[in-house]
């Protein structure tokens, strides 16, 4: 394949946008084709492209497994979600606005993955982050406006921090823009801090997760699928690309990052169990799952010599979570509008339980690899948290499925259309199909087949099922006080909005003594009488002449 293929990967969504603007009704069902060049390039990557016309050092390509794997699942998820959204937007008066934001976000998401230089990554990241605001507020109303406002405020803050960190990294690298060069350049604590916070606001791990629980319930199901499945992982990818392979500062922070990832994993479950809406519970599940990706990143910082293995694990976990979470959010959209049959629920249970490590799925494979990585590290005592995390994840996703079932329409509701059903089913089957399509996952899955290993992965799910059954049978309800927890992020966002609308700046009024000037004018007129106008004209001419001579 020609290196120009990378140009098509990044620009295909923009070409689709031009066709959509010209033929809105005809082009909309075929927008998923804009993901096809990225999917093909992930399997048969051409040589890197250097579009020097953009800026010095611009390079696009996918040279490592992490970039190719993330490009593949991103293209697949966006393609399936595009088909799903096309059927969901039939009859929507604002669908053209939605598709414009959709394609621009897709363009930015693909560009940041294939970016081999800091400039391309930042352009793609900013394009994706800012245009995603249009997806969150598409359904209009108070809740989407509040969610979109908080998201935009934090997105702009994150962009500023990432830009500052990028400038610091360029200075540390003596002006180099290549991300590969940055891997060998040490970083300072200030640079690492601003990049960790900036990218963390996008990734949504604790305590930088505050926009996620508001954005997902407000956004359409297809937007939530790509937002949780693909976009938030750009924050993890940014930390992996921008920060060096081996650095004393990062190594000293590794245990702190490991603790933050573990807290995020369990905090997301605890808050998700208190939700009364399925998409809010799934949003907190994303907060929990992104904590495991942060654990992988922390292990890479702690043991730089095993970075290549951590990169493979990061790729496998990202693909597994992205496709499974996309299927769940799209399933939540179907359950909110249509009456699902029993086999639909069985299909949706597959990605849900795969996220908890169900045996014979991609979830079991990545859990085995993560446990082996933890066992081989200096923090092997943390491995018991992975078993507890699997049970906690299963409980949370069981509640999310129960909320979907409880909130679906009555028996007289229509069945989901095939144009939404088939892309959703394709994503639901991915946890079972991926291990047989991907050699790295297949090796890990075969390692999980011995009876002892199978039981180790199965009993946390059985325990979660028993706890869920006991709670349901007892009729226990979440206390009202816990269901109405305060939301300081929403209150702070509203306060900032009011502050910007009415800034606390005192009004400045000119103090002019009109009576005094009016008295002087009358005295001048009485003094010169009829010659006042003529004299004034000559004075003005004299002043202009003096100004011209000067």
Image: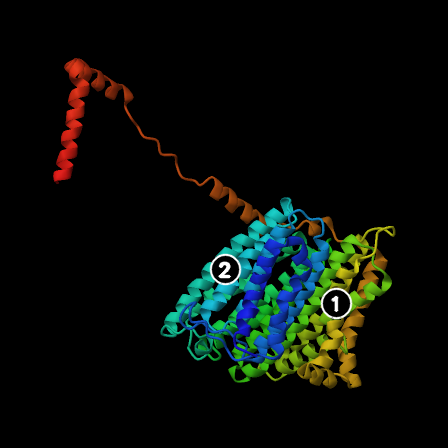
The part of the image, by quadrant, that contains residue 395 is: bottom right
The part of the image, by quadrant, that contains residue 440 is: bottom right
**Quarter of the figure that contains the N terminus:** bottom right
Residue identified by numbered label 1: 352
Contact, mark 1 vs mark 2 (Cβ under 8 Å): no
Q: Is residue 303 above or below residue 16?
A: below
**Residue positioned most to the right:** 411
Q: Is residue 514 above or below residue 200?
A: above
The part of the image, by quadrant, that contains residue 82 is: bottom right
Instruction: Look at 78% across and 71% down and name the residue there.
Output: 461
Q: CA distance from mark 1 to mark 2?
A: 31 Å
* Relative depth, front residue between 516 and 88: 88
In-image side of 382 versus 499 (left or right): right
Name which of mark 1 and mark 2 comes first in the sequence.
Answer: 2
**Crowd band around label 2 with a 10 angstrom C-alpha radius: few (<14), some (14–19), many (20+):** many
Q: Which mark is residue 264?
A: none
- The spot of residue 68 in percent (x, y) is 59, 76
* Relative depth, front residue between 135 and 170: 135
- The spot of residue 129 in percent (x, y) is 54, 59
- Secondary structure of the residue carrying numbered label 1: helix
Residue identified by numbered label 2: 158
Instruction: Look at 75% across and 67% down and name the residue there.
Output: 352
Q: Is residue 498 above or below residue 324?
A: above
- The spot of residue 23 in percent (x, y) is 63, 54
* Relative depth, front residue between 38 and 241: 38
- Secondary structure of the residue carrying numbered label 2: helix
Residue 141 visible in the displayed image? yes
**Quarter of the figure that contains the C terminus:** top left
């Amino acid at each position: 394949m020609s290196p120009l293929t990378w140009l098509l990967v990044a620009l295909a969504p923009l070409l689709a946008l031009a066709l959509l603007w010209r033929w809105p009704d005809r082009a909309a069902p075929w927008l998923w084709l804009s993901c096809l060049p990225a999917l093909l390039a992930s399997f048969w990557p051409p040589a890197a492209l250097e579009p020097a016309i953009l800026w010095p050092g611009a390079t696009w390509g996918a040279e490592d497994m992490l970039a190719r794997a993330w490009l593949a699942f991103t293209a697949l998820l966006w393609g399936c979600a595009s088909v799903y959204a096309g059927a969901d937007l039939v009859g929507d008066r604002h669908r053209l606005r939605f598709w414009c934001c959709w394609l621009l976000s897709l363009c930015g998401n693909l560009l940041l993955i294939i970016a081999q230089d800091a400039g391309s990554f930042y352009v793609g990241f900013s394009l994706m982050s800012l245009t995603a605001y249009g997806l969150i507020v598409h359904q209009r109303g108070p809740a989407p406006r509040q969610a979109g406002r908080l998201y935009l405020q934090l997105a702009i803050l994150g962009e500023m921090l990432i830009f500052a960190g990028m400038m610091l990294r360029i200075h540390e690298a003596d002006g180099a823009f290549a991300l590969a060069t940055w891997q060998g350049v040490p970083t300072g604590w200030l640079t690492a801090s601003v990049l960790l916070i900036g990218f963390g606001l996008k990734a949504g791990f604790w305590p930088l997760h505050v926009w996620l629980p508001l954005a997902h319930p407000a956004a359409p199901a297809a937007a939530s699928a790509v937002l949780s499945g693909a976009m938030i992982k750009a924050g993890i990818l940014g930390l992996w690309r921008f920060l060096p392979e081996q650095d004393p500062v990062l190594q000293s922070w590794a245990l702190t990052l490991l603790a933050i990832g573990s807290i995020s994993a369990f905090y997301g479950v605890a808050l998700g169990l208190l939700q009364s809406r399925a998409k809010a519970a799934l949003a907190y599940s994303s907060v929990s799952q992104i904590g495991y990706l942060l654990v992988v990143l922390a292990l890479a910082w702690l043991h730089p010599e095993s970075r290549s293995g951590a990169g493979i694990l990061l790729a496998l976990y990202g693909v597994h979570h992205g496709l499974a979470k996309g299927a769940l959010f799209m399933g939540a959209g179907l359950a909110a509008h249509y009456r699902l049959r029993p086999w639909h629920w069985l299909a949706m249970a597959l990605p849900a339980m795969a996220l908890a490590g169900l045996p014979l799925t991609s979830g079991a494979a990545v859990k085995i690899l993560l446990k082996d990585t933890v066992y081989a590290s200096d923090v092997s005592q943390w491995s018991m948290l992975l078993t507890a995390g699997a049970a906690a994840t299963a409980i949370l996703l069981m509640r999310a499925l129960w909320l979907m079932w409880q909130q679906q329409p009555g028996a007289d509701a229509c069945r989901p259309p095939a144009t939404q059903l088939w892309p959703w089913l394709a994503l639901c089957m991915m946890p079972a199909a991926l291990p047989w399509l991907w050699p790295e996952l297949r090796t890990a899955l075969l390692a999980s087949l011995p009876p002892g290993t199978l039981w180790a992965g199965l009993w946390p799910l059985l325990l979660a099922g028993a706890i869920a059954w006991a709670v349901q049978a007892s009729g226990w309800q979440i206390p009202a006080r816990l269901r109405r927890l305060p939301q300081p992020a929403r209150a702070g966002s509203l306060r900032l909005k009011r502050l910007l609308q009415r800034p606390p700046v005192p009004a400045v009024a000119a103090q002019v003594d009109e009576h005094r000037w009016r008295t002087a004018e009358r005295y001048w007129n009485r003094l010169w009488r009829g010659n006042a106008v003529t004299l004034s004209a000559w004075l003005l001419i004299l002043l202009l002449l003096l100004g011209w001579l000067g």
